[in-house]
């Protein structure tokens, strides 16, 4: 009886930490960020993310358009949408959609970029991160692994930190902070 009780307690504690399902609603927010921009600090530069008004259509889906302006003058455009199960991004270079973050996650959950170039795994739920500008808690942490050499300028493995209501607030590579949210700005017309 004692052995059964201990086994049950161990199974219960294990399922609480590893089987816990977390709702990621508001960990990525597109439509509410139309009137804001986010300034990030990376190792040697800054970049500004903001969403355009309106949507862009690819196939049957409408996507919010995000612009990223780097301090050295380069600009990137990316496309995002959500449904009741996932947050998605559309890669116009390979004409495919991939999951950015499921709406319900479990520790250890894994998924892949549509073209097989990256894998993503939930390695942290309710985590903390300290940046030079702020301390965050209740974060979701994803491990991103490059499986092919498609993105040669990017690290092979890095971690993304997501905060409810803010989205991505930091990234780390080899336990070093490589980028973090400096500030959220309201757009002025």
Image (cartoon, rainbow, N blue to C red):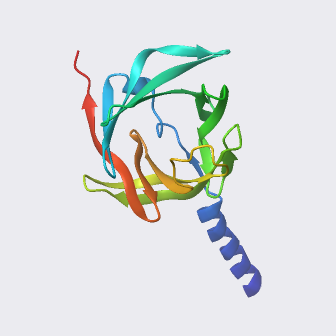
Q: Please tell me which residue lies in front, 128 or 72.
A: 72
Q: Residue at x 47, y 57 (%)?
A: 126
Looking at the picture, how far across and down is residue 60, in whole percent?
A: 67, 15
Q: Residue at x 31, y 36 (%)?
A: 72
Res 45 → quadrant: top left
Looking at the picture, how far across and down is residue 58, in whole percent?
A: 62, 17
Extreme bottom residue here? 2
Extreme left residue here? 188
Q: Please tell me which residue lies in front, 124 or 132.
A: 132
**Residue 65, placed above or below residue 13:** above
Res 57 → quadrant: top right
Looking at the picture, how far across and down is residue 152, in whole percent?
A: 56, 47
The number of numbered discs placed on residues in the rendered structure image is 0
| Quarter of the picture holding the N terminus | bottom right
Q: Please tell me which residue lies in front, 186 or 84.
A: 186
Q: Please tell me which residue lies in front, 187 or 58.
A: 58
Q: Could you tell whether 146 is left or right of 56 in the image?
A: right
Q: Residue at x 44, y 57 (%)?
A: 172
Q: Residue at x 70, y 71 (%)?
A: 11
| Quarter of the picture holding the C terminus | top left
**Residue 175, placed above or below residue 23:** below
- Whether residue 85 is visible here, answered yes or no, is no
Looking at the picture, how far across and down is residue 185, in whole percent?
A: 25, 32
């Amino acid at each position: 009886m004692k052995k059964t009780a201990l086994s049950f307690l161990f199974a219960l504690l294990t399922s609480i930490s590893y089987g816990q399902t977390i709702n990621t609603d508001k960990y990525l927010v597109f439509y509410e960020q139309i009137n804001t921009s986010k300034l990030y600090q990376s190792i040697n530069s800054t970049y500004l993310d903001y969403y355009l008004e309106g949507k862009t259509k690819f196939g049957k889906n409408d996507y919010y358009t995000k612009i990223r302006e780097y301090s050295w003058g380069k600009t990137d455009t990316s496309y995002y949408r959500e449904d009741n199960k996932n947050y998605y991004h559309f890669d116009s270079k390979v004409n495919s959609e991939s999951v950015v973050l499921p709406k319900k996650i479990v520790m250890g959950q894994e998924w892949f970029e549509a073209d097989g170039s990256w894998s993503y795994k939930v390695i942290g739920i309710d985590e903390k991160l300290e940046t030079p500008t702020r301390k965050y808690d209740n974060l979701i942490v994803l491990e991103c692994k490059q499986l092919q050499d498609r993105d040669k300028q990017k690290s092979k493995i890095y971690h993304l930190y997501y905060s409810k209501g803010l989205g991505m607030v930091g990234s780390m590579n080899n336990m070093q902070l490589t980028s973090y949210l400096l500030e959220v700005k309201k757009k002025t017309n």
